[in-house]
Image: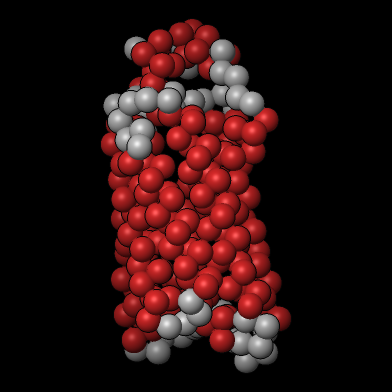
Amino acid sequence: MDQADTLADDTIHRTFWHKLLLGCGVAGSILFTLTYFSFGAIAPNYDMMRESISDLDLLPHGWIQSANFIVFGLFTGAFAIGLRKEMEGGFGLTLIPVFHIFTAFGLILAGIFTHSYEHTIALVITFVSTLISFLLLARRFASDARWRGWATYTLLSTVLMIAMLGIFCYAESKHGAYAGVFERLIVVTRLVWISIFTIRLFLGQTLSADSEAATS
């Protein structure tokens, strides 16, 4: 990190509420993961290795997973607001937060409609919106020297999630023993990405276009 980067990072000031909104991205992902894992671990006759996360909706007390989708959606929406404030300008200023909002909307719908045609559509909205937001972020990272390497990392994460979805769909259609594992790898891939991303922000990095101009 050169002196200009250091000076730019040192001038970053976020309000408590801005930090809280950004932190919702990680908190929501962790809470979602802990909830579906814990619920699945104690649920009778449920095989986490084989069955999907959505199958938890069909179990006794399935409302827990339905609520888990909805809460995750609310946290994701809050993160989208924080991300919009973080960017302050530049490429994807509107589109990146909007597709995070679409992801949030899909998650909330998935919680409302349990294991039905509408539930599947909601999950498609969630997944496609997540992929598009990653691609848009990769484009923004590519033009920002402060995030060197993150365009590649984000694209690789996108490809990995697509590959895991393809394997999950194939394994589920064949009643494969590890279908549930591949679906969970999609969630974990996003969780790892958003955790590292948010930590970098809290350690002083920024997506602000104004700061980008100052360091160029």
Locate residue 19, reporting x and y percent.
62, 33
Q: Residue at x 49, y 31 (%)?
A: 85
Q: Residue at x 32, y 35 (%)?
A: 92
Q: Residue at x 31, y 50 (%)?
A: 132
When the figure is inspected, residue 36 is found, relative to residue 46, above or below; the finding is above
Locate residue 12, reporting x and y percent.
56, 18
Image quarter of residue 90 = top left
Locate residue 136, reporting x and y percent.
31, 41
Seen in the image, is 5 located left or right of residue 124?
right
Q: How is the image coloured?
A: secondary structure
Identify the residue at the far bottom of this view. 45
Seen in the image, is 170 located left or right of residue 81?
left
When the figure is inspected, residue 191 is found, relative to residue 87, above or below; the finding is below
Image quarter of residue 64 = bottom right
Q: Nearer the viewer, residue 134 or 176?
A: 134
When the figure is inspected, residue 149 is found, relative to residue 119, above or below; the finding is above
Q: Nearer the viewer, residue 168 or 24?
A: 24
Q: How many marks?
A: 0
Check the picture and name the quadrant holding the C terminus: top left
Q: Residue at x 36, y 72 (%)?
A: 121
Residue 96 visible (yes or no): yes
Locate residue 1, reporting x and y percent.
47, 17
Residue 156 visible (yes or no): no
Seen in the image, is 206 located left or right of residue 142?
right
